[in-house]
Image (spheres, grey):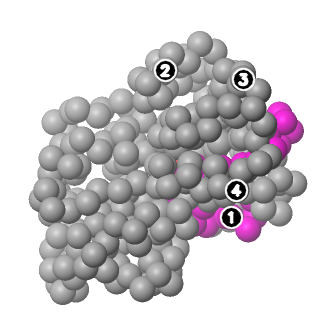
Amino acid sequence: MKIGVFDSGFGGLTVLRALMDRIPEASYLYLGDTARLPYGAKSRETVARYAASSAKFLVGEGAEFLVIACNTASALALDAIRDAASVPVLGVVETGANAADVSSATRDVMVIATAATVESHAYAAACRARGLRVIEKACPLLVPLVEEGWIEHPVTAEVLRIYLTELTEQARQAELNADTLVLGCTHYPLLRGQIERAVPETLWVIDSAVATAAQVDRRLAGSRGTNTAEPPQFFATDSVAKFRTLGSRFLGHAIESVELVDLGN
Ligand code: DGL
């Protein structure tokens, strides 16, 4: 089974890592649409166009199942991706909301995500459908900081402190007793250590990577084969050297080769 995993950049590597741990016998194709990132600051139409062309590319390379490891594309463009791809497609917003549902005892949750994801209110709808109260906050500076590799960096720590203080105030005003913080962007788990240090210990910080991998595992049960997998193949639409260096760090495995692809603009 060949699984295509797609994000605008490095963030989806957090989902790829969880998939490789959970389903090691599958083969993986990963596309980072780094030339057109960030998606989170763009309109629905643009994100849909970028995401549909990325999905088509992965299917053309042989992907038999697509994981949209990008909350922005999942929130704004899942239908467009399904229309463009001839294979089953799984997004990460529903799996993130499922993880929040399992985690929250107070039934109040907070979500941080890109501006486009927050404006779509896809998380609010998915959380409310599960009986959760929710507030969402856009954190637009975090994706560029991650793409720059500024993980343990004082600027990132300060930006996070400001966002999380504002989020706490927003929750207080809404009279929410939140016990769960959803990382509603696949770039944010790369900042998980920093985020956990900045919030009270009683707040569960969750991301959709592990929940997504578990759901893919269930969906593919019986059809994923038992062959020894080939190493993952990586594609990027911008600097392959940067992708190799930073990507290896984020994936936790060396990325030997990355192919540069041109998906237009
Ligand atoms: N990693 C993507 C997400 O989960 C967003 C990154 C971007 O803004 O391009 O939303």
Where residue 258 sits: x, y (%)? 64, 20
The answer to whether mark 1 and mark 3 are in CB contact below 8 A is no
Q: Is mark 4 within 8 Å of ligand 1?
A: no
Whole-angstrom CA distance, mark 4 to mark 3, is: 20 Å
Sequence-wise first label, 4 or 3: 4
Where residue 132 sits: x, y (%)? 38, 82
Q: Amino acid at mark 3?
A: Thr
Provide the residue designation for mark 2: 253
Whole-angstrom CA distance, mark 4 to mark 1, is: 17 Å
Specify start and end residues of the magenta stretch as a single range.
58-81
User: Which of the pair 36/117 is nearer the observer?
Assistant: 117
Q: Is residue 189 left or right of residue 186?
A: left
The image quadrant where one finds the N terminus is: top right
Local secondary structure at mark 2: loop
Provide the residue designation for mark 3: 228
Provide the residue designation for mark 4: 219
Front disc: 3 or 2: 3
Q: Quadrant of residue 25?
A: top right
Q: Residue at x 12, y 59 (%)?
A: 200
Q: Which mark is residue 78?
A: 1
10 Å neighbourhood of mark 3: few (<14), some, or many (≥20)?
few
Where residue 65 sits: x, y (%)? 76, 48
User: Which of the pair 214/114 is nearer the observer?
Assistant: 214
Whole-angstrom CA distance, mark 2 to mark 1, is: 29 Å
Sequence-wise first label, 4 or 2: 4
